[in-house]
Amino acid sequence: MIAVDTNVVSELMKVHPDSQVLRWGSLVDDGDITVPTVAAAELFHGVERLPGGSRRFGLELALDAFFRRVGDERMLHFDARAAVEFGRVMGARSRAGRPIATMDALIAATCLAHDVGLATRNIRDFGGLGLELVDPWR
């Protein structure tokens, strides 16, 4: 099982996604992909920030279709175990003098709590946390 970060979902929703990301996606069984609820929240927030118009409407439709296809059973939920991991991630990064964005820490904590790897372009942001990381762009 592998979770997809916000940037991976965004890339796959583009009209012309990166060929490496498409290739990676074709090698992973759909049933092995999960989406952290925090990443979903980031995606919906991104759409909500856009002004009304055809671009926003198109993204709303694409997100709706994507999450209908994923289904709730393949969403990776932030839960009590993830809350504990979140505290550990934030504390460790704080002590190391290497801060991490809150949303990234929430995604990392969710993956750690559920023992799931993460596909992301932001390997550096998630590095050193004990996560199995995959960069679909490489």
Image: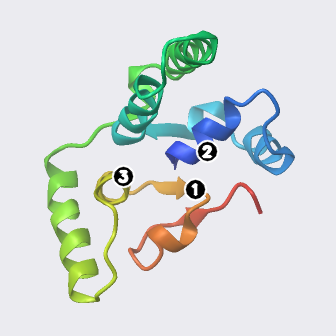
Mark 2 / mark 1, whichever is N-terminal: 2
Quarter of the image with the C terminus is bottom right
| Disc 2 and disc 1 in contact, CB within 8 angstroms | yes
- According to the picture, the residue beneath numbered tag 2 turns out to be 8
Q: Amino acid at mark 3?
A: Ile
- Compute the Cα span from label 3 to label 2: 13 Å
Within 10 angstroms of label 2, few (less than 14), some, or many (20 or more) residues? many
- According to the picture, the residue beneath numbered tag 3 turns out to be 107
Image coordinates of residue 20 in percent, x first then y, are 82, 51
- Compute the Cα span from label 2 to label 1: 6 Å
The foreground one among 22 and 57 is 57
Image coordinates of residue 137 in percent, x first then y, are 74, 57
- Compute the Cα span from label 3 to label 1: 11 Å
Image coordinates of residue 133 in percent, x first then y, are 55, 65
Can residue 1 be seen here?
Answer: no
Q: Residue at x 43, y 80 (%)?
A: 128
- According to the picture, the residue beneath numbered tag 1 turns out to be 120
User: SS of the residue at dot 3?
Assistant: helix
Direction from residue 131 to residue 33 in the image, left or right: right
Q: Residue at x 51, y 43 (%)?
A: 6
Image coordinates of residue 97 in percent, x first then y, are 28, 87
User: SS of the residue at dot 1?
Assistant: loop
Direction from residue 67 to residue 8 in the image, left or right: right
Work out whether 23 lies above or below 65. below
Q: Amino acid at mark 1?
A: Thr
User: SS of the residue at dot 2?
Assistant: helix
Picture quadrant of residue 109: bottom left
